[in-house]
Amino acid sequence: MSKPKKTPRPKAETPKGFRDYFGSEVSERKAMLDAIAAVYHRYGFDALETSAVETVEALGKFLPDVDRPNEGVFGWQEADDEGKGDWLALRYDLTAPLARVYAQHRNDLPTPYRRYAMGPVWRNEKPGPGRFRQFYQCDADTVGSGSVAADAEICAMLADTLEEVGIPRGDYIVRVNNRKVLNGVLETMGLHDAGQRDAVLRTIDKFDKVGAAGVRELLTTGRKDASGAFIDGVGLSDVQAEPVLAFLTSKAAGVTQTLENLRAAVGDSEAGAQGVDELQDIAALLGAQGYGPDRIDIDPSVVRGLGYYTGPVFEAELTFEILDEKGRKRQFGSVAGGGRYDDLVKRFTGQAVPATGVSIGVDRLLAALREKGRMNSTTSGPVVVTVMDKSRMADYQAMVAELRQAGIRAEVYLGNPKNFGNQLKYADRRGSPIAVIEGGDEHAAGVVQIKDLILGAKIAESATLEQWKERPSQFEVPRVDLVTKVREILESQA
Amino acid sequence: MSKPKKTPRPKAETPKGFRDYFGSEVSERKAMLDAIAAVYHRYGFDALETSAVETVEALGKFLPDVDRPNEGVFGWQEADDEGKGDWLALRYDLTAPLARVYAQHRNDLPTPYRRYAMGPVWRNEKPGPGRFRQFYQCDADTVGSGSVAADAEICAMLADTLEEVGIPRGDYIVRVNNRKVLNGVLETMGLHDAGQRDAVLRTIDKFDKVGAAGVRELLTTGRKDASGAFIDGVGLSDVQAEPVLAFLTSKAAGVTQTLENLRAAVGDSEAGAQGVDELQDIAALLGAQGYGPDRIDIDPSVVRGLGYYTGPVFEAELTFEILDEKGRKRQFGSVAGGGRYDDLVKRFTGQAVPATGVSIGVDRLLAALREKGRMNSTTSGPVVVTVMDKSRMADYQAMVAELRQAGIRAEVYLGNPKNFGNQLKYADRRGSPIAVIEGGDEHAAGVVQIKDLILGAKIAESATLEQWKERPSQFEVPRVDLVTKVREILESQA
C-alpha cells in the first residue's frame, strides 16, 4: 500500500454544474417522490427503472427544446477489442429510454403500457445560478392508446398529484391545448411551406415571453428585443398573422366559448376540427369525473412543447404569487408539462405507436412548497447520549440500543469526549432534541440527567427568570425510566 | 419537424451490461432501501446524495479490489472553450464521493459526521451472467471518529438491518477481523520488504477460494490451480508461512479463546496487540448491547478487504443453504462488507481523518430474500374497468375515479375496446384482481358486473362443478355499491 506522494493533492470539488444534497434535502425530495409514486400507482401505472446509460443511437435527438445544441448530452465511446465501440451517453430525459424499452420489450408488455419512472437525468449544458446539469424528473406515460381518454386521465392524475404533495385546489391550474388545432390554423392560413411553418412554430414558442403584440411583430416585420437587438420577422402580412393570434388568444371565460373561438380559428380545416373535438372530449371526460375548469382548463395560450408534441399538450402552473429576486411579485409558474407524441417508438420499429404522458419537475415543485412554507421541516436530529467516562462506553451504547429499540432516533457521541462543551455543540449542530448525561455520581445513584435542548434553547432566548424556575429543561430520572422520560419529552416537543 | 428518413433505424437495445427493471423489481428494491434507510436513520445517520458524476481527479484510484484495471470507470473529457476541460467520470462506489464531500464541506459538517447514501454506481468492466455495469449500493459511514465504538456500532446496525429486511436471527452472521492484527503477524515474521508484504496480502485475499492448504502453497513454493496452470509462490519457507496460517485459522469455539490464539499469533508486536485489544473492545461493546457471537463474531478468517482497510473489517454472510446452478448445496455467502479506512480524506487535505463504514449489496440481498421465498410478492394489479360502449367512456372514468378516491388501484381499459376478449387478456397480463363490466343492459338497470379474477382463475384450474355453483366468481351489484363490493372482494382475496 505504498503511495507515490509526488502528485499534487486533488481538489475536493463537485464538477461544475453538479451539487450535493444533505439530510432533509434528500428526505424531503424522497417524501415527494413517494407521494407522487403512490398516486401514479393508484392510477394503474407500473414502475420502470432503466439504467442511466443508453447508446447514443437509441437516445437520438428528441429533446423537447428545439433550440438545444446537439452536444447536449454527456457521452463517451466504449473501448472494444479494436478500441472503437458504441457511443454511450447519460439519458437526458425519461421519455427517450421509455421509447427504447417499449420497442425492445413490446411483445412482453401489456398494451396499453402505463409506466411511471423517477430519477436523475443529465444535461451537458452551461450551468447557471440554480441550473444544474443533473436533476430529477418524475414521469408517467401511457404507450399504445390513441384515445383522448388517456390524455384526460393524465391531466386528472396531474391535478391529484399536485394536491397530494400539498398544493391546495385554487393554487394550481392544469392548462390544456392541442397541436392539431394549431395545425388546422396553419392549414387555413394556406401555410404549406415547411420552413415557414417551422418559423411560425418557433415564434409561437415565444408567446410566453413576448405576448400577443410581440408575436405579431415577430410573425410580420420583426421586433427589437429588450437588449435593443433586432430580430427578423417571419415575413407574414398582418392579415396572414391574424389566425395565429386568434388561436393564441381564444381563451374565453367559459370552455364552451373557448371551443367556439377555436372552431372559428381553424375555419374549414378537418385536422383543426378534429383537434377542437378532442379538446371538447377531454373537457367532457374530466367534467364527468368532477375536474372542472378551476382545476383543468382548455387554454390555447399554452405553447410550451407545442412544436414537439403531436396532439394534446398540458402544462401545470402554480398560480400563487411569490417575490422574485428583485422583490417583485410574480406567479410561481410551471412545474409540470406533457402531451401526446406519436412518433418516438416509430424511430425504432417503423410503426407509429400513440403515446401520451407527463413529466413533473420535482425540484421546482419542492422549491414551490418551501416558498409557501408547506414543507413540514424534518429537523428530527437524534437524541445524543454524551460520554462522561470513556471507559463506560458500553453503558452508553446500551442506552442508545434501548432508545433505538423503542423506535427513537439516538446515538452516542463518538468524537473525542474530553471537552464536554464540544459534545453539546455537536448536539446543537445535529439539531438534537435531547441530550442524555450520566457521570460517575449519576451512575452510582442509578440515575441519568436528561436535557430538553429545544426547551432549553427557547428559555435561553426569551424566558424570564420566573418561567425558568417553573419549567426546568433538565431532569434527573432513574436509569430504568430513561426511555419513558425521553419519549415524554419528545411528545411535549411535537 | 421534418425528419431525414435515410438513416437506418436505431437498435432498441440496452448497452451491454445494463438492464431494465420492471414493476415489482423496482418496488421490491425500493421497499428494501426504505427499510435500510429507516434503520440507518434511527442510528443517527443523515442522508447524503451526491451526483453521479465526479471529476476523475476527485475519484482517484481507491477501489477496494487491488486487481482492478485503471480503466474501470466510465469517463469523458469536458469540452471547455479551448476544447480541453476536466476529465469527468461516473462514481464507482459511494465511498470516494463521501471522502470528497467531507473534505469539501468539513467546516460545515458535524464531527463526527455520520451519513448514509444509497444509489447506483457504475463499473466499466466486462459484463457477465448476472454481473451488471450499473448496480445499487447502500452505505453508512462515520467520518471523524477513531473510536472502536464507531466500528462496533456499524456492526450492530448491520445486524439490525439484516433482521429488519427479513433475514431472521440464525440465518446471518457478521464476522469481524482486524487489519492491525495481520500487520502484527507480518511484523513478528520480520517481513519488512514492502513488495513481499503486498504479495502476502494478495495471497491472503485468496483464502476464501483456496483454503488454508492452498494459501500455504501460495505463500511458499507455488500451486497448480483448477485449470492446471501453475501459480508462482511468494517464496516463504514453511516456518515463515506458519504465523499467517495461524492467524487465518485462529477462530476458536469461544471469543476468549479466539483472542488468545490471536495474541499468540502476533507475538511481541505492539501494533498486533493493539489490534487484538480493539477486537476485544468491539466484542465487549457488542456484548453489552446484547449482540452475542451468534450474530456478530470475531473471526480472523474474514479476509475480504483486508488489504484495503486499515483497522477492523466486517463482513455479513447469509448462512442458509441454497442450490447453485448445478443443483449443489452451498451457503448464500456475503451480502455486505466494510471496515475502517483512515486515509481517504487525507488525499485531499493532507490530514488523516479516521472513518469506518459498511456497504450493503442490495441486489444480492434481494436475490437472497427471493431465494428464501421471503419477498411478499407485490402482484397488486389494478382493478380494470372494461369498456363495453366507447361513447360512455366518461361513465367508466367516473367509476375508476370513485375507486381511486377510496384508495383502490384502478384503471379504465384504454386500448381498442372492440374485442372484449382482449380486455380480459389485458387484465390477466396486468395481474388484475377484479374486472368491472357495465354494458347497455346493466346501465339501463343501474347495475354493474364484478368479476373476481383471482377466484375465477382458481375455479378454472381446480374446482369441481359443485364448488363452482357454491362460489360464484361474478356478481351483479347496484352501481352505487361498486366501491363497497370491490373492497369486499379485495379483502376476501387478501
Image (cartoon, coloured by chain):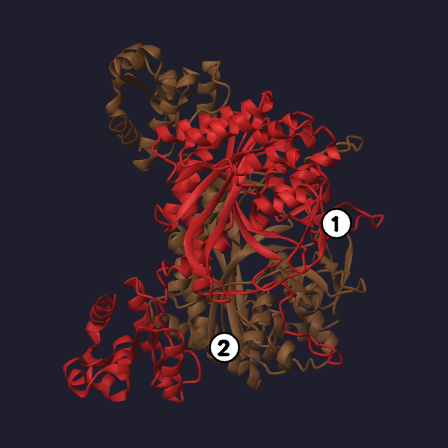
Chain colours: A brown, B red
The residue wearing badge 2 is: A108
Q: Position of residue A112 (x, y in %)?
A: 46, 77
Who is closer to the viewer here, A110 or B218?
B218
Q: Position of residue A353 (x, y in %)?
A: 56, 79
- CA gap between label 1 and label 2 equals 55 Å
Disc 1 is attached to a residue of which chain?
Answer: A
Place residue B240 in its image quadrant.
top right
Q: Secondary structure at mark 2?
A: loop
Tell whether B213 sits left or right of A412.
Answer: right
The amino acid pointed to by label 1 is Ser
Image quadrant holding the N terminus of chain B, namely bottom right
**Residue B32 visible here:** yes
Q: Is B194 drawn above or below residue A188 in the view shown?
A: above
Count of residue discs = 2
Q: Residues within 10 Å of mark 1 (few under 14, many from 20)?
A: few
Foreground disc of the pair 1, 2: 2
Q: Secondary structure at mark 1?
A: loop
Q: Position of residue B71 (x, y in %)?
A: 73, 51
Q: Is A229 drawn above or below residue A22 in the view shown?
A: below
Image quadrant holding the C terminus of chain B, namely bottom left
Tell whether B169 sits left or right of B260.
Answer: left
The amino acid pointed to by label 2 is Asp
The residue wearing badge 1 is: A227
Who is closer to the viewer here, A153 or A454?
A454
Disc 2 is attached to a residue of which chain?
Answer: A
**Residue A138 visible here:** no
Q: Residue at x 70, y 72 (%)?
A: A198
Tell whether B262 sits left or right of A18.
Answer: left
Who is closer to the viewer here, B351 or A91?
B351
